[in-house]
Each structure stands twice: as C-alpha cells, then as structure tokens.
Amino acid sequence: MTPFTVTPLADALGAEISGVDLSAPLAPDVIDAIRHAWDTHLVLRFRGQTLSDPQLLAFTRHFGELDPPGPNPYGKPFLAEFPEINVISNIKKDGMPVGNLGDGEAVWHCDMTYIDTPPRAALLYSLRIPPSGGDTYWSNMYLAWDTLPGDLKKQIDGKRAIHDATYNSAGMMRKGMKEVTDPREAPGAHHPLVIRHPDTRRPALYLGRRRNSYIVGMDLDESNALLDALWSHATQPQFTFRQVWRVGDLIMWDNRCTLHRRDAFDPNASREMHRTQIKGGIVTPYETADMVS
Ligand code: OGA
Ligand code: MN
C-alpha cells in the first residue's frame, strides 16, 4: 500500500503527493513509493513543506548523488555554506543578485544538457513567490515521442544534436563563453535526439534547448526547419503541466524525459527558490532497431 496520496495534476504529467513531511526522516518504503510515483508521473509536487537547507539536501540524497550547480554568471556559489544548493531568484542584496535566472521568461529547456552527463533530476523548493507570474511548466517527452508523426520520427532516426553551452534559459551568457554566430560551431555536448530512459527503458524525445541547436550532419536550413517542427510538437499545451507556485512547494522533476520553462514576473516582486540536482550519466540513444516505423 502506498504510504501517501498521489493525485495527478494534469493529463500529461505531474502529480501531487500529500501526507508526507519531507523535513522528517523517511522510511525506505516511503522513498521507494516516491521513486515509483516519480517514474510514473515525471514531476512530483509536495505542498506545505518547511525545509531548512540541510533538510533539502538530505531529502535530495535519497534519490542519488548530489550534483553541484553549473557555473553561474557571478563565478561563486550563491550560498557559501551550502555550495551544492543553487538559488533561483531575482532578489538583489547590496546590488548583487542572490540567485540565478532573474525575473524574465526562462525559455523551454532541459537542465545542463550541454555537458556529456547532464543531471538526472532537479528539486526546486519555493521560499518566496511573486503575487502573480513566474509560473513554471513541464512537458512530457515520452508523450512527445510517442505522438510524433512517423515522417518526423524517420528524419531524426539515429541523429544527434548539439546542446549549446553558451546561454542559459534566461538568455544570459554563461561565464567564459562567447557569442555564437553559426550553430554548427556551438560549444556543447552532442546527444541523441531520441533517448532511452535508463530506468523506465521508455523512448523519449531529447531536445535540450532550441537556441543554437543543430542536428549534426544536416544542412543548416534543414536542421532549423526540422528542429522548429520538433519543438512546436513537443511543447503543445496538452503535453504540459502548469505549476502556480505557493510558498512551501517542493517540485522534483525527471530531467531526462521532461522539458520546462518559466513565465516572466514583475521585476519589483521577489521570488526565491532553493534548488538541488542529482548527478546523471551518459545519455543513451534509443536504438534504431527499436524504432517504431
Ligand atoms: C531551474 C529552472 C524555473 C523556475 O531551476 O532549472 O528552470 O521556475 N527554474 O524558476
Ligand atoms: Mn531549468
């Protein structure tokens, strides 16, 4: 029997878990049940939580090894005491941002796929939210693959794409990067466009981020046209779940089979989230032999 209640939040993905206090030590059967719900729903939400930073770290460790944040534009961890925690915030203290991503839109993306071993998952815990705006959306990439028209499936059969390292989802240039004028020369990992999820074994469309993406070996215009078609398919509203945040929400997402984006919000409002992520491995292709024709 599941030791908590699981309530789906949208048709495509997302579920609310209620009846679990994440600040308390959790029994192995509870963790197993959370893992199972996570594989089923891809994004889990826990409401009404009160978590210290060590408690957020302890909860995260149940699901794998902590993966430190990628380099932020300011060159040092936002929380000196807890460098494994990232801060997502628009708040400034003495003129310096206390966190990343600002107050603008964060465009659709998958986290840190510009490296060979992107994080497997991320957890975002909300401490302050604006009165409106700043909603976050996730999209289900199993569904995007399953429903992809056959001609598009054929066109990406066995192909890989460049996952640009230059810009973050808020459009800020990452530290040490320079502007890219030709996506074929963008720095960043090359990953298969269709992957096999290592735990569920299901195929998923794997797009990373649109900016400076390029399908290796294709003519640039053809690559752009194909990527546009894939992206507009993958981000259709029926594949998504929309999160309207409350203080005390903890959301955890599987970074291998989902994309996410965030709405802009009022620059005069304050939003603050603490975030952890879990180490992942090499991204494995969905073998051509398995492709549905
Ligand atoms: C992230 C991210 C979205 C948000 O933390 O990876 O994209 O809602 N955040 O702030
Ligand atoms: Mn992100």
Image (spheres, rainbow, N blue to C red):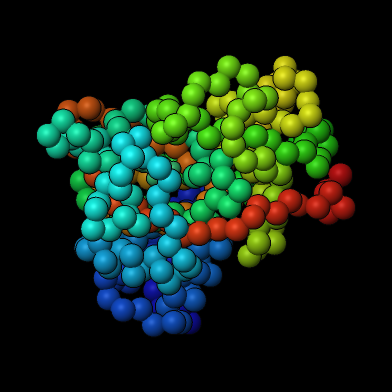
Looking at the rendering, the quadrant in which ligand 1 lies is: top left
Q: Position of residue 159 (x, y in %)?
A: 77, 38
Above or below, comparing residue 195 to residue 212 in the picture: below
Q: Quadrant of residue 100?
A: top left
Horizontal placement of 210 versus 149: left or right?
left
The residue lying at 50 percent from left, 35 percent from top is: 108
The residue lying at 51 percent from left, 44 percent from top is: 112
Q: Position of residue 273 (x, y in %)?
A: 28, 48
Above or below, comparing residue 24 to residue 174 in the picture: below
How many callouts does the rendering have? 0
Nearest the viewer among 5 and 176 is 176
Q: Position of residue 164 (x, y in %)?
A: 57, 33
Q: Quadrant of residue 280?
A: bottom right
- In this view, the residue farthest toward the left is 94
Q: Quadrant of residue 44?
A: bottom left
Above or below, comparing residue 57 to residue 145 in the picture: below
The residue lying at 63 percent from left, 19 percent from top is: 182
Quadrant showing the C terminus: top right
Horizontal placement of 13 versus 150: left or right?
left
Q: Is residue 242 visible?
A: no
Q: Is residue 161 visible?
A: yes
Q: Position of residue 201 (x, y in %)?
A: 69, 62
The residue lying at 60 percent from left, 58 percent from top is: 281
